[in-house]
Structure formats: structure tokens, C-alpha cells
Image (spheres, rainbow, N blue to C red):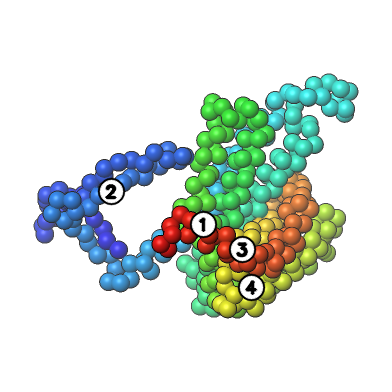
Amino acid sequence: MFLVPKFLVGSGGEIGERNDVKCVALENKLGIHGSPTAVMVYGEVGGARGLLIGEENQGLNAMFVMMNLARFSLGLQGTGIAERACQAAFSYAATRVQGRHTASGGKAVAIIRHPGVRRALLNLKANTHAARNLTYYSASLIDVLGSSASAAERQEAQRLLSFLTPIVKGWVSEMAVDSTNAALQIFGGAGYIEETGVAQLVRDARITTIYEGTTTIQANDLVHRKVIGDKGAVFALMAKKVMDTALRLQASPAPRLCRAGAQLAVALSQVTAATDWIVKQGEDRIESVLAVAETYLEACGRLFGGWRLLHAASLAQGGTAAFRCSPSLTDELEACSSYFADWQLSQVDGLSSAVMQAGASVTDAGFLFEEAVHRLNPAA
């Protein structure tokens, strides 16, 4: 890894001649126009000079220190974009009058009165809460690494953070794309007009599933290195934490949280079955595993995102000295938790089943891909 300065610096600290490095173009991107990326050219006239960062042959390791932090930061970016989309959708739905509603005596009402719009809005809010709580939990693990905690506690935090990083990056970024698309849909035709601003959110969110490693790369890392690599040990550690929350929720005096705790336990058993299947396949059938890696990441995202959302709702409902929030936020967290359990966790069964079944279908269809390669490149 090298640092290539624009100007060379003399031994006395004086600014010297211009280095042979140039920015020749700014990229015209789909979104995030406020963050320009550039095409750089090095060594066109005599050779550029760079300064080695760290030790030789350790540049990739150094890069991944930056990369893993960036992947975590994308969880924050995705959450922030989804939150903005959620706020915009709620504001628009509360003021956009269209259609009639029987409860209003047949009078025209704001679209926030329509059940389908309400479900879409609740989905936005619940997903954003889940993503925020999962990302903040990961941030707390980073705090442990820099704290005075014991060596054993720091080691556990590192293992958990390593496991969760591809989920935070992959699942939250995909959630941000879904959320901005859902917000645009609530705006209807107005959302397709630049003046409303929601189209910008759609564009800005789209890159989050791509840079710092696409969702497929995150999923491959999750199943290959984090699950198969340690034979499911870190997942088992996470599973114990999830089950502890599920059991505590099932003893909650709040009926909706009690029911959600039972649903969380069921979802955990389903993802555990998929995890055991992945570990059993191992390296011998890695192609089938990698074919469904993104589906497994999605199942994990819903499970662990739901876990942290339900955990927050439980704390809010308990009203402990360490966690106090307003009654309105307590009610909001409970409503979002109940919905997330009913909607998102209920779909974990299908995702987990697909993990264990669909991989073979992909490998069996290999002839389709080979045929395409030979048709376009007969010499391959």
C-alpha cells in the first residue's frame, strides 16, 4: 500500500516538484454526486513516486483494516438513507389526499388512511429500527475492542464483530435499496419527479450494495469464512444470545412482545438448520453453498435485525434506569417489533428452506452458463 503525494517533499520538509500523478476525469455516477470519485493516472511521464505504508507484502492486510471499517460504516449509511426515506414517505402520505375510505363516511382522505399504505409505512419504520439497532450493536462491539475489557471479552467481541460485519454491510444496504424504492412507490408519480427528492434517495442508496464489496461478496465471506471456516461456532455464540432474548420476551407482560419472542425462537431454529446444512456441506460442495449465500445472508439479517429490535422493545417496555424512553417511542418499538415478527421473521422459514434446497438447482443448471460462454467466446 502506497501514499502517492501530489507534490514531492524534500528532506528539509520543503515542497518540491510535482509528482507524476494526475486526476484525468471525474466519474459521472448514478448517485452520490456530492461524493466525487476520480480516474487517476500514475507515471505517464517518467514515473510516479510513492511512500510505502506499513511493511512490504502486508498492503492487503492494511487495506482490510480500512475496508472492514468502511463496511460497518455502510450499515450506518444505509440506515441513514432508509430513515430519510421513511420520514419523507410518512410526511407525504399524511398530506396527500387521494381516494375515499369507509371509516371517513366515504370522504376523501390522505393516503396514510389506506391499509396498504399503512403496511408499507410500517415496514419502512420497522426495517429502519431493526437496521439501526443491529448497526449500533456492532458499534458497541467496536467500543469493547478499544476498552479496558478483559482479553477474553475483547476476543469474543472481535469474533462477533467479524461475523456481523458482512451482515451489517450486506443486509442493511439491501434494506436501504428496498426502503427507498418503497418510499418512491408511496409518492407515486410524484416520486419520479426530481423536485420531491425521493428519487435522489433511490440513486444514493443503490451504491451501498456495491462498493466495499458487493452483497454477493459479503455473503460469500459470511458462509465461507465465518460459518464453514469455524464450523458454525460463532453462529452458535450468536444463537445463544438470540435465544436468551426470545425466552425473556416470552415472559413479558406485553402480549405482543410475548408472541414476538416465540416467533423469534422459531426463526432462530430455522436459520440454525440452514447453518448446520452449510457446515455439513463444507468445502466439498462449496459451489452449491455459494449459490445460495445471499439468501442465507438475508435470513441472518432478518433474524439478527429482529433480535436487536425486539431487545430494544423489551428494554423500553421494562423502563429500567439504564434505558428510559418516552411512552410514544415505547409504543412505536412495540408496534414495530410485533410487525417485524409477523412479517419479516415469518418469511425466514422460506429463506432457510431455499438455502438448503436451491443450491443444487443452480449447479445442475451449469450447462446453461457454459453454453452462453461458448456461444460468445468459442475459444474459451
Q: CA distance from mark 2 to mark 1?
A: 34 Å
Of circles 3 and 2, the one toward us is 3
Viewer-nearest residue: 136 or 267: 267
Q: In this figure, which residue is indicated by the disc labeled 3? A: 365
Instruction: Indicate the secondary structure of the residue bearing disc 4.
Output: helix
Q: In this figure, which residue is indicated by the disc labeled 1? A: 372
Instruction: Indicate the secondary structure of the residue bearing disc 2.
Output: strand
Q: In this figure, which residue is indicated by the disc labeled 4? A: 278
Q: Which quadrant of the view contains residue 270?
A: bottom right
User: Residue 210, which numbered label?
Assistant: none
Q: In this figure, which residue is indicated by the disc labeled 2? A: 40
Query: Identity of the amino acid at label 3?
Result: Ala
Q: Which comes before the other along the chain, label 4 or label 3? A: 4
Q: CA distance from mark 1 to mark 3?
A: 12 Å
Query: Identity of the amino acid at label 1?
Result: Ala
Instruction: Indicate the secondary structure of the residue bearing disc 1.
Output: helix
Number of numbered discs on residues: 4
